[in-house]
Image (tube, grey):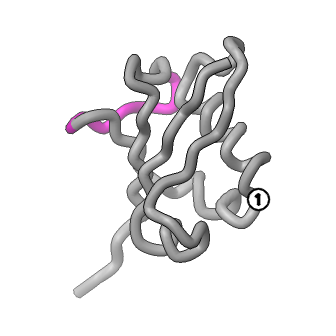
Amino acid sequence: MKQITFELFANLERLAGSGTCSVEAHDDVSTIADALALLARERPELASSLDRCACVAGDTIVRRADPVPADRRIALLPPVAGG
């Protein structure tokens, strides 16, 4: 088992009550999409917001088909509206 840590911002941070959230993942969690699905199961209050988030590893936006980063840290950036 490995731990995946999500960094949460804006409404995700408010919903979770924290700026980070960690989940325990089996070896079959290999992509960003797998990790997001696990997070949605473990933290259902975040589930409806995850599809609209950009995922970032380090300083790079990653696609859901990309592998989970080696450091197992994924930042989730919700869309921003403004004028």
Q: Is residue 55 left or right of residue 16?
A: left
* Label 1: element kind: helix
Segment colored magenta = 59-65
Q: Is residue 29 magenta?
A: no
Q: Which residue is found at the position 42% from the left and 51% from the top? A: 7
Query: As displayed, is residue 8 above or below residue 83?
Result: above
Q: Nearer the viewer, residue 79 or 38?
A: 38
Q: Which residue is found at the position 67% from the left and 32% from the top? A: 24
| Residue 50, picture quadrant | bottom right
Instruction: State the image coordinates of residue 40 (x, y, percent, origin top left).
Output: 71, 49
Q: Is residue 61 magenta?
A: yes
Amino acid type at mark 1: Pro
Q: Quadrant of the C terminus?
A: bottom left
Instruction: State the image coordinates of residue 68 (x, y, percent, origin top left).
Output: 48, 23
Instruction: State the image coordinates of residue 67 (x, y, percent, origin top left).
Output: 48, 18
Instruction: Give the residue at mark 1.
Output: 44
Q: Which residue is found at the position 53% from the left and 30% from the top? A: 32
Query: As displayed, is residue 70 above or below residue 57?
Result: above
Q: Nearer the viewer, residue 25 or 12?
A: 25
